[in-house]
Structure formats: C-alpha cells, structure tokens
Image: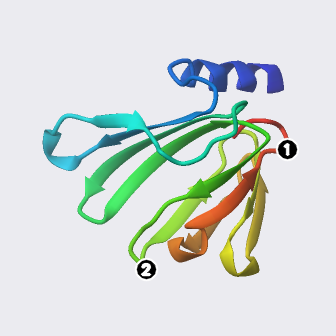
Amino acid sequence: MEKECIQEISQKLKDVPPGKCLTIRHPSGGEAPVSGFAAQEVPENARLKIITYELYPGIEISYNYFQADRFPFHHCHRPSAMAIDHCCRGRIGWEMGDGLSLYFGSGDLSFHMNTKCGDSVITLPLGYY
C-alpha cells in the first residue's frame, strides 16, 4: 500500500522539479488557471504542489502534494481565515507559530486559524503527504 501511495504522489508531482513548489490557482467564474513556481525556499530534495480552487469568494479548497523530509512553509491569509485539513495519505508534522504543533496521518482531520500556520515548518516522517 505504501509503495502505491509513493507512486501516486510521484505521478502527481511529475511536472515539479526538485527544489520547487508549483502553485496552480483556479479562480471562480471560469477564468483561466494561473500557475507558477512559488518564490519560497524549498530544500533541493523537496517537490511541492498546491492546487487551489476558489469555490466562492472567501471559500477555497486546496489539494497539497508534498514529497520531502522537512521544509519551511510560508503563506499569508486574512486574519479571520480558518483552515480545515484532511490527510488522505502519508503523515505530517506541522510546527506552527505560537508553539502550536499538529501531527496527523491518513484519515485525520484538523481545524485551525491560518494566522497560526503562516510561518511554519513541516516534517514528513514517511517522506510524502
């Protein structure tokens, strides 16, 4: 099962070179997607892909595909934004601001305010998420 998960994640990341984070944003209203490589620092052995769909103004869903051991993660949102995270496959350790840490694996769900995770460090014990 784990080998199949790694192969699936690798397939999703085939268009992302090592050391890069590809972001793809699908705006609502049928506008064309916007994609590019994020400027954030990514270790040379990491490959990250974040695909975001704007469902309605202020409501988005993102699919994250990560292959790495550990990497810094930076993003900014409105102070009132809440994140609901669900881990489909893999395992993640997320060291957030203010000393908050989340650790979850396949099937786990978390709720947190985005002000906590804007400047954080992510570890992937299995090497993928």
- When the figure is inspected, residue 39 is found, relative to residue 111, above or below; the finding is above
Helix, strand or loop under label 1? loop
Residue 1 makes an appearance in the image? no
Question: Which image quadrant: the C terminus?
Answer: top right
Residue 88 percent coordinates (x, y): 65, 42
Q: Nearest the camera: 38 or 51?
A: 38
At x 59%, y 18%, the residue is 11
Specify the label residue 20 is tagged with. none
Specify the label residue 79 is tagged with. 2
- When the figure is inspected, residue 100 is found, relative to residue 17, above or below; the finding is below
Q: How is colour applied across the structure in the image? A: rainbow
Left or right of 20? Residue 51 is left
Left or right of 2? Residue 22 is left
Q: How many marks?
A: 2
Q: Nearest the camera: 99 or 52?
A: 99
Residue 109 percent coordinates (x, y): 65, 60
Local packing at callout 2 (Cα closer than 10 Å; few below 14, some 14-19, many 20+) is few
Q: Amino acid at mark 2?
A: Pro
Q: Which residue is mark 1?
A: 125
Q: Amino acid at mark 1?
A: Pro
Residue 81 percent coordinates (x, y): 43, 73
At x 57%, y 23%, the residue is 17
Q: Where on the picture, by quarter, is residue 26?
A: top left
Helix, strand or loop under label 2? loop
- Which residue is the extreme one toward the right? 125
Local packing at callout 1 (Cα closer than 10 Å; few below 14, some 14-19, many 20+) is some
Question: Which image quadrant: the N terminus?
Answer: top right
Residue 54 makes an appearance in the image? yes
At x 50%, y 20%, the residue is 15
Choose the circle earlier in sequence order: 1 or 2. Answer: 2
